[in-house]
Amino acid sequence: MINRVVLVGRLTKDPELRYTPSGVAMARFTLAVNRTFSNQQGEREADFINCVVWRKQAENTANFLKKGSLAGVEGRIQTGSYEGQDGKRVYTTDVVADSVQFLEPRSSSGERSQGGQPFGSGQQQQQQNSFPTYQQNQPMNQQNYTRVDEDPFANSSGPIEVSDDDLPF
């Protein structure tokens, strides 16, 4: 039995952070996830998926993500139900996140709102253009990748020697 979900989408509003009576942090947010196909009018539709995250990840999510932020979520689907105010049974489906990834710099969605996009409030413009604290020591313009048009082996002269000690398996 497998219950795994991987999503990438944008938050539809700021996360709601709450604490249980015993002090455990919990954040709720909704991700708008584009469908891979278009409808009959040629428009792309989206699914709006409710997500829940707990503990320190919940606090980080509330502190670093806001309406319009691009996020990746990995977790599991959880269903439940409760009795509504009208006495009828209400059924719920949530993704309980094990991991929430922040997929763009902190101020990116704020800058996008000034470009006419409907995302974000732009209120965090003055904040530092960086990812959360675990990456603040790296300059934003430093890239850790090789460009496709730059062949790292262009100047090599023949086969590359690799010993068995260098292999990870």
Image: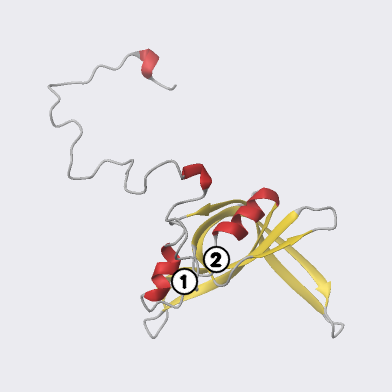
Does the image show residue 97? Answer: no
The residue that mark 2 highlights is 66
- Spatial distance from mark 1 to mark 2, Cα to Cα? 10 Å
- Indicate left or right for 108 with 47 as reference: left
User: How many numbered markers are drawn?
Assistant: 2
Give the amino acid at mark 1: Gly
Q: Is residue 133 above or below residue 72?
A: above
Residue at the image point whose x is 31% and y is 41% from the top: 145
Nearer-the-camera pick, 74 or 24: 24
Nearer-the-camera pick, 66 or 5: 66
Does the image show residue 16? Answer: yes
Q: Is residue 93 above or below residue 165?
A: below
Q: Position of residue 48 (x, y in %)?
A: 57, 72
**Which mark is first along the chain, 2 or 1?**
2
- Indicate left or right for 1 with 39 as reference: right
Residue at the image point whose x is 42% and y is 80% from the top: 39
The residue that mark 1 highlights is 122
Element type at mark 2: loop
Q: Residues within 10 Å of mark 2 (few under 14, many from 20)?
A: many
Residue at the image point whose x is 53% and y is 59% from the top: 7
Q: Position of residue 121 (x, y in %)?
A: 50, 74
As drawn, the residue found furthest toward the right would be 87
Q: Is residue 3 above or below residue 162?
A: below
Residue at the image point whose x is 40% and y is 84% from the top: 40
Q: Residues within 10 Å of mark 1 (few under 14, many from 20)?
A: some
Q: Which mark is residue 25?
A: none
As drawn, the residue found furthest toward the front would be 126
- Indicate left or right for 1 with 89 as reference: left
Mark toward the viewer: 1 or 2: 1
Quadrant, the C terminus = top left
Q: Quadrant of residue 43?
A: bottom left
